[in-house]
């Protein structure tokens, strides 16, 4: 079964086709939503890991409803001053249903091979010593 890890609203979600989830409110009211920040795709031959995201891969979702989360009540109390205050909050959320994970001809890369920077031939201290020796 294919699944992906997407990032939206500052959080990461594991999704697969047919999954329904609630994410931070999405301002776009179109019925089709595209999540382009895909961090990982797995379930095929080899998993693709992004650095930080995978280019050419996105997740299509369908907007179900804009809803509010559960009511959260917080109380503020200051001792010896008769100060009490109760605040309430309901987070706006968007409920979406994942339709499919789309890969636009992404070349299969080996995730175990990580590109490295070339090493310098010397350090700053060695270069400074060479300059001092020339004088």
Image (cartoon, rainbow, N blue to C red):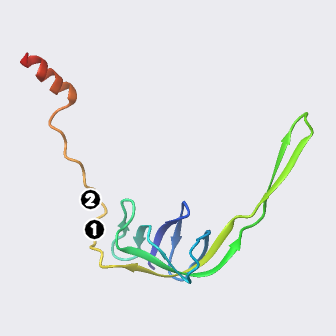
Q: Which label sits on residue 61? A: none
Quarter residue 30 falls in: bottom right
* Image quarter of residue 119: top left
- State how far apart marks 2 and 1 are (Cα): 8 Å
The residue at 62%/69% (across/down) is 25
Q: Position of residue 45 (x, y in %)?
A: 33, 75
Residue found at x 90% / y 35%: 81
Point 75% across, 66% down: residue: 70
Instruction: Answer with left or right where residue 9 lies relative to residue 123.
Output: right
Q: Residue furthest top?
A: 135
Label 2 SS: loop
Against 61, residue 117 (above or below) is above
Check disc 1 and report its element: helix, strand or loop.
Answer: loop
Seen in the image, is 15 located left or right of residue 115? right
Question: As drawn, which residue projects farthest toward the left?
Answer: 134
In the image, is residue 127 above or below residue 121?
above
Identify the residue at horizontal 88%, vertical 45% (top origin). Answer: 84
Number of marks drawn: 2
Which quadrant would residue 91 be assigned to in this image? bottom right
The residue tagged 2 is 113
Q: Which residue is mark 1?
A: 109
Instruction: Tell me if 6 is positioned left or right of 104 in this view.
Output: right
Q: Quadrant of the C terminus?
A: top left
Q: Are marks 2 and 1 in contact (CB under 8 Å)?
A: yes
Q: State the quadrant of the N terminus.
A: bottom left
């Amino acid at each position: 079964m294919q699944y992906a890890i997407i990032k939206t609203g500052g959080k990461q979600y594991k999704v697969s086709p047919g999954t329904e989830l609630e994410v931070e409110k999405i301002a776009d009211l179109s019925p089709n939503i595209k999540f382009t920040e895909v961090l990982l795709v797995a379930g095929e031959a080899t998993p693709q890991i992004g650095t930080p995201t995978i280019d050419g891969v996105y997740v299509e979702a369908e907007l179900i409803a804009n809803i509010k989360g559960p009511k959260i009540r917080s109380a503020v109390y200051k001792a010896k001053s008769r100060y009490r205050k109760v605040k309430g909050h309901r987070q706006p959320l968007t409920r979406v249903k994942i339709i499919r994970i789309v890969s636009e001809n992404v070349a299969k890369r080996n995730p175990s091979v990580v590109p490295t920077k070339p090493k310098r031939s010397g350090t700053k201290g060695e270069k400074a010593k060479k300059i001092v020796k020339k004088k």
